[in-house]
Image: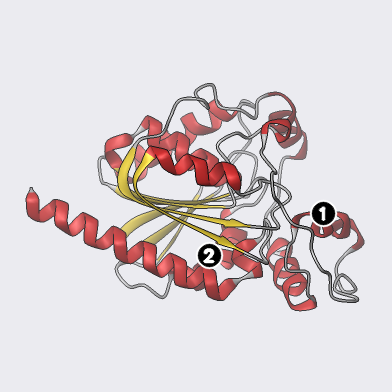
Amino acid sequence: MTLAVRARGDGLPILVLPSFSLDGNAMSMAFEPALAGSPGWQRLYIDLPGTGASPPGEPRSDAVLDELAATVLSVLGGQRFLVAGWSYGGYLAAGLARRLPGSIGGMLLVCTAPKIRPADRDLTGVLPSQAEPGWLRDVPGSLRDHLAHAVGCQTPETARRITAVLARNGPTAESYLAELRAGGFALSDEDVPVRCGAPVSILAGRRDRVAGFTAAFTAMASYDRADYLVLADAGHYLPLEEPGWFAAAAAAWLGACGRWLRAGSAAG
């Protein structure tokens, strides 16, 4: 199958890969404010299997990556592209760089870790949050425990932004996603180093109690042109917790990717 794709804007393609269980519609709400401000880039928001308009498949991340690579080749052919991924999406972005190394013109990895199983993640040094009183007052009860754990900047404004994005998420195949997470989460080549000579920006939060931040820093050894930014107050929802920082970092990354691609074209 070809995964569902939502296109925004015109220009060189950026593949945007969602956090686990989010679809491309929710991702566009979270990432468009940061990416749309830089002209010359087309954003392609993907519905991974079992989310939005993409049906479930085999519940293994290897199968998810197979479908993702097939969709890239179907939609873009041999065109070089950028890839931005949040959490599970960043994990898949690194996997895609292993599959299609010559096609990647840059990577933006947000709140992601090189190992996906919760027991394998490095949470060294992660800080507790200082919650503002009543910050979860307007949040649905089903989300409160999750946000209390995952969010670093615990303010009512942050809660409103995150809740609005989650409310726009499309349908999900819950049994498929549960089976994927329980039995097939890790890619078979997870331990193979990723090599990428294009610009890579890694964004992490000091209060990210889901993915941590130290392993992402260590992963920079695989990237020749990597930047690493860790935000003191951010947690796992960094793009919505610190939208100003996120927009500035995304703009800097796109600028670096544009210069790198132009230099390669001139050399060719």
Q: Which mark is residue 180?
A: none
Q: Which mark is residue 31?
A: 2
**Which residue is denoted by mark 1 in the rendering?**
146
Q: Nearer the viewer, residue 127 or 77?
A: 127
Q: Residues within 10 Å of mark 2 (few under 14, many from 20)?
A: many
Say what amino acid the circle numbered 1 marks.
His
Say what amino acid the circle numbered 2 marks.
Phe
- Look at discs 1 and 2 and give the one toward the viewer: 1
The image quarter in which residue 117 lies: top right
The residue shown at (54%, 21%) is 188
Q: Nearer the viewer, residue 171 or 37?
A: 37
Residue 3 appears in the figure: no
Q: Is residue 151 above or below residue 247?
A: above
The residue shown at (45%, 25%) is 192
Q: Is residue 140 above or below residue 204?
A: below
Q: State which tag comes first along the sequence, 1 or 2.
A: 2
In the rendered view, does 191 fall on the left or right side of 185? left
